Image (cartoon, grey):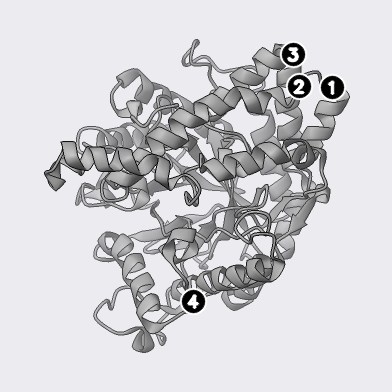
Amino acid sequence: MSFLKVSEAKLANEREEEVVLRGAGLGGWMTMENFITGFPGCEYQIREALTEVLGEQKAEFFFDRFLEHFFTDADAAFFHSLSLNCIRIAINYRHFESPLEPRILRPNAFTHLDRAIRICAAHGIYTIIDLHTAPGGQNGGWHADAGTHIANFWRHKHFMDSGVWLWEHLAKRYKDEPWVAGYNLLNEPADPHPKTGLIPFYDRVIAAIRAIDERHIIFLDGNTYATDFSAFPEDVKTRWGENVAYSIHDYSVFGFPKGGVYTGSEEQREKMHRGYTRKRQWMDERGLCVWNGEWGPVYARKEYEGDGDEDKTEEINKRRYQVLKDQLELYQIVSPINRTASIQFLTVLQDRLSWSIWLYKDIGFQGMVHVSPDTPYIQRLGPFLHKKHRLAVDSWGNDDMNVRDAFQPIVDLIREAVPNEEDRRLYPWPGWSMEERVNRLARATLIAEFLVREWAEYFRGMGENKLEDMARSFRFENCLKREGLNQVLREHAKVTGGEIAL
């Protein structure tokens, strides 16, 4: 079995044979996310609320069984059947240390991560360990599990110390495991002052890892949600070494409800192409290896976006699958180096980008597989899920049509009180417009907080048998496959070569 490495601007095995990683993110598991599993707010909030409702022992029982059922051998076997070869495992630091006992390794901290890596290896699937949730929050998103829009990871040295400490433990644990393709050091950092925060942190953590493990690839996300490399130093090859890949997240606006109707027009494809090449331009100009760590559309559900009309839902999703296909075509045959040429002329060139689509499993919005509506979890929480959708309390891919009028006065008030547009452009602008900032703070943070207890109350009175049934809802055999999405991935795997060169 061969360790993978960066060879010039490509990934390769130890025989210098190119390896194209085609994969998905295992999100919502060791980092739980609200839109993936149906709770409001952040993971730590629902864990605390469920403990209040059920008691510590039964709450821990549920979450442990959830982790056990969410990813099993059957998931890896299905993943392999699509000729996909890499799973990016999103982890939350809280599995490894308690905020009240920083830098003390929790008992059994590696139980589930070890199991997932072992299962994937048995099916010929590489894994990439992704620190998705860092102490204090490395960005203002719900998935940073900080309960605030302020990324305090960059404001307190002890948070960054814990990040380095955790990577030292992960490197010690997996330094001899060739099925681990590498370490994704920090998901979507958003540091307003990267030259004094993000870059020195990367310096520290890379040095700490390399003192333990010289073989694994290091994957570095760009700043501002893996889109901006402008603050990265010019001497990265000598500073951080050759065995480093640089991670973009290439979500297309056309894959989301607010992106309009995608027709695959030349204008839309050109816009998609420009966004992609802009994100990776810094690396291409320096001959560095690029990895697309996250991308992919979200999908309509007939009970929500489709207004109960299955034909309408399918029509929306056909357009989203076309977005998926066009992005994959871009990654396979479009060379981003010749940025002045048109798309037609670029098709003669090769790229063969490695990528990890978001997402493998959820309750029906974006996953390759999703929990069946007939399961105890969805049956029990159905009314709450509809309420959460109506209130648009999840930031990811929401449609605020039912509550827009309630929040527009806040937007108007800010515009009136702060007439200078430049003063309304707060980091991470333009990704967070002023309107988006209002949405995230007023809905996804404030209103979500008031819904946390309601979610937990759905579990009140449950014993271990019922909790087991709720957790078991997430097993592969209790999930449905999103066939349109999976067929696109399967067909693309044939183009890029279905098996890994080992």
Q: Are marks 2 and 3 in contact (CB under 8 Å)?
A: yes
Q: Amino acid at mark 1?
A: Glu
Q: Which mark is residue 329?
A: 4
Counting residues from the N terminus, which is met first, the one under dot 1 or under dot 4? 4
Q: Residue at x 35, y 44 (%)?
A: 408
Tag 4 secondary structure: helix
Counting residues from the N terminus, which is met first, the one under dot 2 or under dot 4? 2
Q: Amino acid at mark 3?
A: Gln
- Separation of disc 3 and disc 4 at Cα? 49 Å
- Separation of disc 2 and disc 3 at Cα? 6 Å
Tag 2 secondary structure: helix
Tag 3 secondary structure: helix
Q: Position of residue 95 (x, y in %)?
A: 58, 25
- Quick one: label 4, few (<14), some, or many (20+) residues within 10 Å? some
Q: Which of label 2 and label 4 is nearer to you?
A: 2
- Separation of disc 1 and disc 2 at Cα? 8 Å
Q: Are marks 1 and 2 in contact (CB under 8 Å)?
A: yes
Q: Nearer the viewer, residue 490 or 370?
A: 370
Q: Farthest right residue?
A: 465
Tag 1 secondary structure: helix
- Separation of disc 1 and disc 3 at Cα? 10 Å
With respect to residue 70, does 228 lie above or below? below
With respect to residue 406, does 431 lie above or below? below
Q: Residue at x 48, y 26 (%)?
A: 166
Q: Which of label 1 and label 2 is nearer to you?
A: 1
Q: Which mark is residue 464?
A: 1
Q: Amino acid at mark 4?
A: Glu
- Separation of disc 2 and disc 4 at Cα? 44 Å
Res 10 quadrant in image: bottom left
Q: Which mark is residue 57?
A: 3
